[in-house]
Image (cartoon, grey):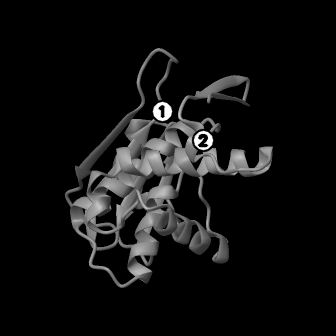
Amino acid sequence: MSLNVLENDVYINIEHSDKITGKNKEETYAYLCNSATSSLLKSSLPSIKKFLDIDDDNVFFEYLRWLYCRNLPSDWRIGSTILAYLREMKLEISHELEVQCLLSTCSQWTYFDKTQKRIIAIQEKNHPKNIICGEKSSQARLEREVFYFSMESSLKTNYQYNYWLLDNESDLDQLEKINGSKLL
């Protein structure tokens, strides 16, 4: 069986629709959105499997319930919400997974954000010299970029993750002069 779904003027063809359990369009759409989110997490967070069985629908839906109950976003901040979820479960999170989650957050921001800002920079409280960034591409044919660098001195933050939205790369040198915001 094959299913075609129209989403933002793009048809998505699902060849293996045996897992689509929806009895109506809303349930089917919800399943497809959840599947897309699960696939995004699996592909952008290779270390997640050590902490969370994202292939198990029950485990994944529990995470989604957790998001909903706390009124947390499942938008470009999905990587950072995974970190918050794992922390609340009292799991010890590796720095590798933390960086992967924040790189994923930056990457998703470059795709979803429609403002004139070009760069997102995220600072980790536990590693205050480390800055994880995402930069929008200047042209549709170019790829967006995510990167990580260390500053010479630490920036002070009261938040687990502090972030800045910047106009251009030269603003990265001025982070200590720009007020950041709490990521979650």
SS at badge 2: loop
Which residue corresponds to the image point at 76% horizontal and 50% vertical from the top-left?
Answer: 23
Report crowding for label 1: few under 14, some 14 to 19, many 20 or more residues within 10 A (C-alpha). many
Q: Residue 95 falls in which quadrant of the image?
A: bottom left
Which residue corresponds to the image point at 36% horizontal and 46% vertical from the top-left?
Answer: 44
Are discs 1 and 2 less than 8 Å apart at CB? yes
- Which three-letter amino acid code belongs to the residue tagged 2? Asp
Q: Which residue is mark 1?
A: 136
Report crowding for label 2: few under 14, some 14 to 19, many 20 or more residues within 10 A (C-alpha). few
Q: Which mark is residue 113?
A: 2
Q: Is residue 1 left or right of residue 60?
A: right
> Which of these two is toward me, 97 or 57?
57
Q: Position of residue 167 (x, y in %)?
A: 52, 39
Q: Position of residue 25 (x, y in %)?
A: 79, 44
Relative to 88, residue 58 above or below: above
Q: Is residue 3 left or right of residue 176?
A: right
- Which three-letter amino acid code belongs to the residue tagged 1? Lys
Q: Quadrant of the C terminus?
A: bottom right
In the displayed orientation, state which residue is furthest to the top.
Answer: 141
Relative to 159, residue 172 above or below: above
Q: Position of residue 64 (x, y in %)?
A: 58, 66
Relative to 178, residue 109 above or below: above
